[in-house]
Image: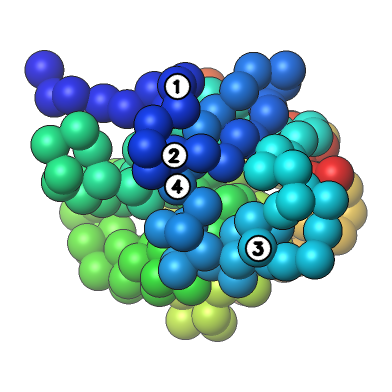
Amino acid sequence: MKAENDFSQRSPLRQFELVVEKRSIFVNAHYLAEISPYFEYLCFGDFREAREGRAELEDESYDEVIELLRFICPDPEYLLRRDVTEANFAVLTHFSHLMQIPSLHRQLEAFIEGEFSSDDYEVKDTSLVDMIVEAKDAAFSDPVMEILHKKLAKVELERVKELVKKLPGSYAEPILAEVQRLAMVYPAEQPYRSAYRYNKFDQRVFF
C-alpha cells in the first residue's frame, strides 16, 4: 500500500492551518502559493488569515480537500502521484477553478483531450454529468466541452433528462441542447451508475 499524507499534524514545512468541517488540515503555504494565486493571497496577502496563519474554508468537504492535496502535493516518499480518472475529475476540476490552480486545469483538459476522448473509453453517465457541470463552471475550452458532450450524447435522451432534472436550468438546458444537437450522430448506449454527489455543486463556495 502506498504511503499517503493525512495533513492532520503540523510539520516544519506545513505550518498554515486550513479548517474544513471543523477539522484542521496543515499545509505548506509556500508550496501552494507557488502553484496558486488563490493561496498566494490567502497565505501571504494583507488579510487576517495570512496574519494568523489560519483560514476556514466554508461549505467544502474535508475529504475532498484532502483528495485535492494528495493529488497536488508530494507524498511521504517525495513522489507526485497525479493520475486523473473519472472518479476524481469532478472534484479536481472544482478546486482547480475555485483555488485557481492553472497547472491542474491544464492537466484535466489534457486528460479529456487524450485517453478520455477515445471511443473505447467508457464512463458512467452520472459521472459524466458531474464532469460537465464542473468543467462548465471552470470555463474549460470549447473543444474539451465538445468531447464531454459527445460522450453524453451516446446516452438515451430520456436518461439524460432524468440525470439533469435536479439541476438548475442554467445547467440542464445547455446540456440537453448539446445532447440533442449531437444525438443524431452518436447512437445511444445503455446507462451506467455512479455515486458521485452532483447535486451538491451549488453548495461549493468558499467563505
Q: Amino acid at mark 3?
A: Phe
Q: Measure how far apart labels 1 and 3 are at the Cα level.
A: 21 Å
Q: Residue 156's spot in the image, x, y percent?
A: 54, 45
Q: Which residue is mark 1?
A: 9
Give the CA distance from mark 2 to mark 4.
Answer: 4 Å
Q: In 3D space, how far apart are the residues under numbered discs 3 and 4 (Cα atoms)?
A: 12 Å
User: Of the residues under marks 2 and 1, which one precedes in the sequence?
Assistant: 1
Residue at 38% x, 43% y is: 13
Which of pointers 3 and 4 lies earlier in the amino acid sequence? 4
- Residue 68 appears in the figure: no
Instruction: Identify residue for label 2.
Output: 14
Which residue is denoted by mark 4 in the rendering? 28
Reply above or below: 39 against 84. Answer: below
The reply, left or right, for residue 126 in relation to residue 34 is right
**Left or right of 166, for residue 160:** left
Q: Is residue 197 above or below residue 138?
A: above
Is tag 2's residue or tag 4's residue first in the polypeptide sequence? 2
Callout 3 environment at 10 Å: few (<14), some (14 to 19), or many (20+)? some
Give me the disc on residue 173. Answer: none
Q: Amino acid at mark 4?
A: Asn
Q: Are marks 2 and 1 in contact (CB under 8 Å)?
A: yes
Report x, y in % for residue 37.
60, 71
Q: Which residue is tagged 3?
A: 44
